[in-house]
Each structure stands twice: as structure tokens, then as C-alpha cells.
Image (cartoon, helix red, strand yellow):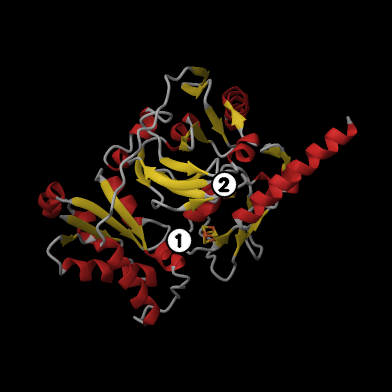
Amino acid sequence: MSESTFMGVDREKIDWCPTIDYSKCNDCMDCVEFCPHQVFEVREDQTPKLIVKNPNNCVVFCRACSKTCGLDALSFPDKTETTKKIKATRKAEKAKKEAGE
Amino acid sequence: MKCLLPCNGLDKCAGLVSGQAAVELSQQDDFELICPVLLNQNKSPYEKILAQGDLVVIDGCNTRCASKLAQSLDLKIKDKYNVSDVAKSMDLKLGKDLAVNETTKAVQKALVEKLTQTEDKKEASTFEMTTIDYDSFMEGKFVFKVPKQGFFFNENDCWVYVSGNSARIGVSDYVQQNLSDILYYDPPEIDDEIEQFDDCGSIESGKAVFEIIAPVSGRVTAVNEALQDSPEWINESPYERGWLVEIALTDEVTEDLEILHDGSSYFEYLKKKVAQDV
Ligand code: SF4
Ligand code: SF4
């Protein structure tokens, strides 16, 4: 199982996982071998063979698998935008809590 | 003297650029060329120059063949470059075409310029860290240490230690245990403006590359130059001698720190994380 929160925010509310560019990917599976979090799934005999199965298992702000991809086929959301959203969500939740209590 | 080890990958444009840049540089007095294919066969023709000079690796892409070759031969990498990263930073794309064109020329030129630049290094400030008290726990044969006070952590396992208007950044014991022997530290540029959670450099072991995720925003004022010669300090002393970056803080620091873990909360977080890993 993965963490269910990241920096105090529900993981499900954060949009962060690799996107595979199928025009570049050659199914070498180096990324799959590298990532210990079961983010990817390899489907034998299907096209595309490689998919992002569990996006929420991906560690927010990690981009490590893209550093193993020689073809530069993996991309990630914009960090600044993601950070902004995390902070905004935290604030909103804090305000909600305070209003409720 | 610098010994250049390009990947010289023949089937990718980026690999070709690495080779061509190395050949171009080797026309200058201060550079010696190493052929990766011959080196892989036999180290001895290069032993003399390697003993005299610093090894500079030029990888074409993230497969990092040249880095991996150096690592497999236990050669100390003094500095390294990645053609694809250089192209990316210039907003250029190296296509599949293997022919020399305007793009490959531009990237090659930028790479050669980077390699011939003499860096203006800034001295680390007189940063004060008080004596550190550690908490620790064991999992299997590994001991994980976390400082009790003064440090804050993000969930990407990077720490920050604030002192007045500046701060030091580094990685936690967890990162260094996971990567095992750290062989190379790639620092950010001095004066880089970094937002919280931006990456500020990376560290690399035989296993992987780890991006340093900044716990707070700020401007880079110094990097730990000593790690260029002794990257193993990050393994030996991740919270002290193995610090990575020094930054000047911004006004947002209170807000930044608010969302981080303090020592005791990171200690609990890490315990859970390590337990899940096994
Ligand atoms: S490492 Fe890159 S090329 Fe290889 S399978 Fe993953 S995405 Fe595709
Ligand atoms: S970014 Fe990190 S956690 Fe996410 S899929 Fe890649 S290696 Fe796994």
C-alpha cells in the first residue's frame, strides 16, 4: 500500500504521476524495473503494453523513473502548479476544520 | 587536465553529439579524449592520464552508459554532463535523425562552452549548526538516524536546517541508505531561485539518480564543494558534513515550514515508511 496522504493532503487530491509518450517509448521496461511502487503495469500481448495503473502510488514530486528512460518518454505535471494546489488544499481544509470546531 | 569520457552512442543523435563535443574539446591542450569502447576493453592505455587528470563524463541520454562504465571501473567522476539535459535547457529537441544539423551544432556548441567555462566558486558562509542530538531506530540490519531538533523534512526525505536568514538543505539517512554508495553530486547553480519542492541538484549512486526536492524556497548561495571529491560524506554524515546546498531564505519561509515535518514527526513517518518497504 502507498501513503494515503502527502504533506498532510489526501493523495487522491494531488495530480502527480508519469505520463507515457507512446511515440517515444520502446517498451524496454527500465522504468518498471526501477520503480518500487507498482505505479506501472505491463500487459503482455496488449497495446500499449505499458500503462500507468496506479497513479496515486506515485510519490509526489518523484521523477526518478524518467531518469532511467533513455528515450525521454516519461513526463510529469508542472511542479510549481502542483505545489500551489497542495498549499491551497491545505489552507482550505484548515479553514473548514476551524469553522467546524 | 580533464579526461573526457563521452558515451559516443552511435545510434542516437545525443550520443553522437557527446562524441563530437569531446573530439572538438580534445583539440585544446587541457583535454584528453577517452574512447569508451577501448576503455571498456582495457583500462591500461588510459591509466596514466586518468592518474593525472580529472574525469569528466559526457552522457548522451538518461541511460547514462558513460557514467555506468566509469562506475563499473571504479573511476572517480569529477564532473558530468548530459547532452539531452543540455538540449532540454535550451528548449531544443534532438530528433531521431543522425545527421549533423543546426540543432546538433547548437547543442554541441553549448556543451563545449560549458566545459571550457571556469567556474567562479563561492565560499560557503560561516554557517552555524549546533551539536545535533539524534533519535534512531533499527529495521533489519539498518539503523536510521533522525535529528531530534532544528531540522524540518518534506516527504521526499530532504531536510532543511534554518539559521537566521539562511538555511542548509540535505537528504535524510533514508535516502543515503536506499541509494547506497553515492558516487556523484550534481549541485544547482549559485544564484538559482528555487521554489519549495523544486529540484535543486541531484545525487547519484550505481543504483539510481535522486533529485533533491527543496523543502523551502530560496536563492542558492553556496553548495558543498567538498562533496565533489568526497561524495561518500553524504552516506557517512547526511545531516552534517554531507549537507548539499545553502540558500538565502525568502519571506515565505514560515509558510513553507508550516507544511513540513519536524524531527519527531518525521521520525514517526519514516518508521512507517521503512516498515512498508520491507
Ligand atoms: S523506460 Fe522509457 S522507453 Fe523504457 S518502457 Fe519506460 S517509458 Fe518506455
Ligand atoms: S516518479 Fe517515482 S514513484 Fe512515480 S512512477 Fe516514477 S519512480 Fe515510481
Q: Is residue B114 above or below residue B102?
A: above
The answer to whether the residue bearing label 1 lies less than 8 angstroms from the nearest atom of ligand 1 is yes
For residue B14, side relative to residue A3 (left or right): left
Give the number of the disc on residue B6.
none
The chain letter for the residue carrying disc 1 is: A
Residue bearing the label numbered 1: A70
Residue B197, labelled with which disc? 2
Q: Quadrant of residue B251?
A: top right
Is B127 or B237 nearer to us in this picture? Answer: B127
Quadrant (top left/top right/bottom left/bottom right) for the C terminus of chain B:
top right
- Return the chain for callout 2: B
Percent coordinates x, y for residue B34 in the rendering: 19, 59
Label 2, label 1: how many angstroms apart (C-alpha)? 25 Å
**Judging from the image, what secondary structure is the residue with disc 2 in?**
loop
Question: Residue B136 at x, y = what percent?
Answer: 51, 18
Between B206 and B110, the one lying in front of the other is B110
Could you tell me residue B135's position as x and y percent? 52, 17
Inspect the image, locate mark 1, and give the three-letter code of the amino acid beneath it.
Gly
Q: Nearer the viewer, residue B203 or B117?
A: B117
